[in-house]
Image (cartoon, rainbow, N blue to C red):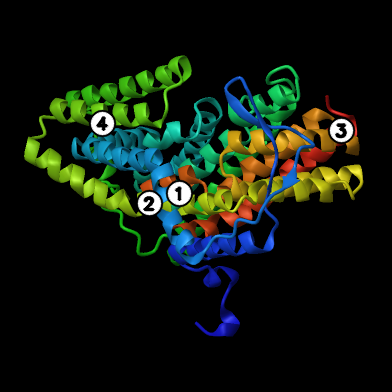
Amino acid sequence: MSQSTKKWYDYIPHPVVMLFGIILLAALMSYILPAGSFERTIIDGRSRVVPGTYSAMEQSPIGFMDMFRAFSTGFKQASDIIFLVLMSGVMFGILEKSKMIENVVGTLVKSMGLQRKYFIVVLITLVYGFMGVAVGYENNIALIPIAAVVSLALGGDLVLAAGMSVGAVTVGFGLSPINPYTVGIGHQIAEMQMFSGVGLRSMLCLFGICLVAWYNVRYFKRIVEKPEKSLAYGLKIDGFQLSKSIDKYQITSNNWLVLWIFIAGLGVMLFGVFQYQWSLREISAIFILIAIAAGFASRIGSSVFSETALASIALVAPGAFMVGYARTISVILEQGHINDTIAYQLSEWLQLFPTYTSAILMSVAQSGINMFIPSGSGQALATLPIMIPVGDVLGLTRQSTILAFQIGDGVTNLFNPTLGGLIAMLSLCRVPFDRWLRFIFPLTFMILILAWCFLLFAVWIGWS
């Protein structure tokens, strides 16, 4: 391809190269930006920034060897997510070996008919979006590969599968009116009623998920008409594609048994998450138990079980590696003590603009901070104690300030290379990050425009 005919996405480097470039940039910033920190206090077991306490400290530049030592620290800090990806891969491999997923998906498509394939794409997108709203983010990781089987059964590709699952879950979770990590913590910090303003946020979330569904159907129609337009060329589909024609599928009694084992396992997992605040470790343990129980129920021998588990790990290992790799960026920023400096400088800059402009720029600022603090709760605790008083000075209601934060954090998670959950989910769909960027950038821009319209409306009505 000549230089004159290249498009913007042809310049996107390989994800490994891209993340290494960000790591280098983070290390370089530790020499350029002044080191500093806010004082913090523990409230309800969480460390929260104390507004007005930012102070400079001795520079902590990241040396050459320090940068490479940060890799092992990054992998250590991301170990729970890395293990979750590996165990999710093992569980799906065993479920696929039992033929349960293939038969269930094949039967579903047969009953609804391929002539309704676009409706099925919309339906699946809405289901995943709702799961993002109600269940959480990494909690849905076990369901991601199912979208790949559905997409290929309909004649789609793995990028469409990621759009239906990863895209919908990310938007649903990011814009959820009941997101405890962003809206919930934001309301606690702002001393407001928990999850107040649910009506406007619900409308934004619903419109956002519907926009994802429309975008997925649009992409699907394009690759059906012109298969060469697919962004999934060359991606491995082993274990995802159906092995026989649609009309031959039916669900066996053993498939039903394995399906109920899977559903019961997810039910136990969700109960533990909401009732006992289970972490990723407990979720990984449930995935292991599901895999073992499904293997016994399907009468899979020990040798076949072991070979299937190792083969499944091999398929998701690149994604698991990328999770730890991306975490290194946050480690370098923390060691360089420039996280708080970035938040402080952005809050000072926002006070130079009028109300409507500052509301949008506050969202943009949170988007930038999100690349350095990908955790929604971590970002809320680090920035909202600063941004809420800034919003008060600018004439923004606290609901509007929290909405600006939610938009900046939630929408840009669609392409955040430092977000371990996103990288993990994409790996389960076997979609490289550079391919995902080509697919998701236009949709991200559309959702941002939609969200900013809601934000400006909130400012206009003095939403409180």
Residue pictured at 32% horizontal, 49% vertical: 316
Label 3 vs label 4, nearer the camera: 3
Residue at mark 3: 392
Earlier residue among tags 1 and 3: 3
Residue at mark 1: 423
Disc 2 and disc 1: Cα gap in Å? 6 Å
Residue at mark 4: 288
User: Disc 1 residue type?
Assistant: Ile
Point out residue 138 in the picture as x, y percentages from the top left corner: 45, 35
**Which of the 4 image quarters holds residue 33?**
bottom right
Extreme-top residue of the structure: 275
Disc 3 and disc 4: Cα gap in Å? 49 Å
> Is 267 located above or below residue 85 in the figure?
above
Earlier residue among tags 3 and 2: 2
Label 1 vs label 3, nearer the camera: 3
User: Disc 4 residue type?
Assistant: Ile
**Residues under numbered marks 3 and 2 in contact, where contact means CB atoms less than 8 Å apart:** no
Earlier residue among tags 3 and 4: 4
> Is 128 located above or below residue 57 in the figure?
above
Disc 3 and disc 2: Cα gap in Å? 42 Å
